[in-house]
Image (cartoon, helix red, strand yellow):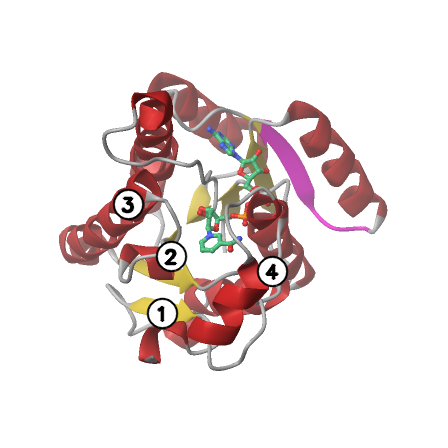
Amino acid sequence: MGTAIVTGGASGIGLATVVLLARAGRKVGIADRNADQLASVCAELQAQGLAVFAVPLDVTDRAGCAAAMAEVEATQGAISTVVTCAGIAAVSRIGDEANAAGWDREIAINLTGTYNIIAGAIAQLKASPSASVVTISSVVGMRSGFAEVGYAASKGGVLALTRQLARELAAFDIRVNCVAPGYVATPMLAGGAGDVQDWMDIHTPMKRLGRSEEIAEAIAFLTTDAASYITGAVLPVDGGYLCV
Ligand SMILES: NC(=O)c1ccc[n+]([C@@H]2O[C@H](COP(=O)([O-])OP(=O)(O)OC[C@H]3O[C@@H](n4cnc5c(N)ncnc54)[C@H](O)[C@@H]3O)[C@@H](O)[C@H]2O)c1
């Protein structure tokens, strides 16, 4: 297996994914824009003997993503797995100009950023004998959530991007799947709007937040040969949010 790249790997779901992949023996590049957090997480995991390395980047910078992926190939070996966890949630209400920037940032990071990193690695993925991409949408891409019009649209876009790429890239033996988390206890949610436990009680049969590790298990599975016939799939990991 080649090198794995996890964007947003310095925190939350991305970090849990880095740990799982590295513990399974993968060499993992932690790609994140938060330089301080990236350095400390990387040092901590390396001290545990895990084969991780830092890839400082901002997923909104398409040329920067391409350059970073080329550098990974040159210094760490060709990439065969990309997991796109980098994302933000901002308040974005329609017609509220004060929050219009939220829409722009969510589309730029969550949707275009997903495209940018996959595009940056695509030549290496095509050259790999069996490659996989796992994108991260959200239940909010399929069912409405808090005051998150930009978030919902960006995550719906990730679903469409995933299905389209699965179709186009199957010819190159690249599987492309999507995990759609429900509400998960991470730093992102801590900054979110509304009373989360109330929302859980009403909308989630399991009546609790997910843990990053529970999402990472699904992501890691989709990267392995155990999922060799799965492509274009959307796997909700949501405590039942979507079945209500
Ligand atoms: N936490 C939830 O409830 C939840 C639910 C559904 C989906 N998600 C999705 O899961 C993914 C991970 O979220 P999380 O909860 O772990 O959040 P988090 O805030 O803990 O981690 C997100 C990481 O992405 C990085 N990042 C943000 N913008 C970036 C950029 N432009 N370039 C590079 N890195 C960037 C941050 O520095 C951070 O390390 C996101 O796509 C999020 O939308 C989260």
Which residue is painted at 67% across and 55% down in the image?
Answer: 19
Percent from the top left, x then y, of residue 131?
Answer: 36, 55
**Disc on the earlier residue, 1 or 3:** 3
**Disc on the earlier residue, 2 or 4:** 2
Asked if the residue at label 4 sits under 8 Å from ligand 1, the reply is: yes
Q: CA distance from mark 2 to mark 1?
A: 10 Å
Which amino acid, mark 1? Leu
Q: Which residue is mark 3?
A: 126
Q: Which residue is mark 4?
A: 212
**Disc on the earlier residue, 2 or 3:** 3
The part of the chain drawn in magenta is 49-55
Rendered image: mark on residue 138: 2
Which residue is painted at 58% across and 43% down in the image?
Answer: 9
Q: Which residue is mark 1?
A: 235
Disc 3 and disc 4 in contact, CB within 8 angstroms: no
**Disc on the earlier residue, 1 or 4:** 4
